[in-house]
Image (spheres, rainbow, N blue to C red):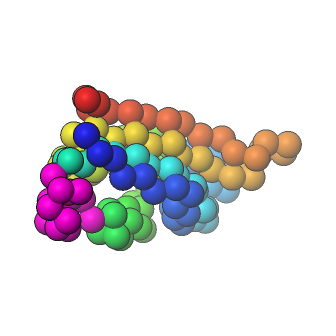
Amino acid sequence: MSRIFIDELRVDASVGIYPREQAARQTIEMNLEFGVPDAAARQDDIASTIDYAAVIARIRKDLAERHFNLLEALGEHVVSLLCEDFGAPWARIAIAKTGVARGVRRVGVAIERGKRD
């Protein structure tokens, strides 16, 4: 099985439980990886794969429209849309907030769902 990866996607999102996080959107960074059928390479046709531009646009749209208390919930939402809406057989996300604590570059979670061949 082939895979698509999207590294260092930056998205403004409303995520967090603290008042300062709920008052203003913050930039989060995510790395995505998801499976696609091998047919995509053989057929050389966008219809046989997952369009990464459509994935990026959907993530930006969804995160612009709602608030998540936890990065875990945000990550599960993105993984679910990859598997359920885009048909990825498996998906992995690493998602992080930057600059949320003194002396800490990033704080985040990693989630993987589905079966990998």
Q: Main secondary structure of the magenta part?
A: helix
Residue 81 drawn at (x, y percent)? 26, 51
Q: Residue at x 43, y 34 (%)?
A: 111
Q: Residue at x 45, y 56 (%)?
A: 6
Vertical comparison of 80 with 58: above or below: above
The image quarter containing residue 35 is top left
Q: Is residue 28 left or right of residue 69?
A: right
**Does the segment drawn in magenta span residue 57?**
no
The image quarter containing residue 26 is bottom right
Q: Residue at x 59, y 40 (%)?
A: 108
Residue 23 appears anywhere in the view = no
Q: Is residue 91 left or right of residue 71?
A: left
Magenta residue span: 39-51
Point out the image quarter for the C terminus: top left
Residue 10 drawn at (x, y percent)? 55, 63
Point out the image quarter for the N terminus: top left
**Does the segment drawn in magenta span residue 49?**
yes
Which of 61 and 51 lies nearest the eye of the viewer?
A: 51
Q: Is residue 68 left or right of residue 89?
A: right
Residue 55 appears anywhere in the view = yes
Vertical comparison of 57 with 71: above or below: below
Which of 14 and 62 lies nearest the eye of the viewer?
A: 62
The image quarter containing residue 76 is top left
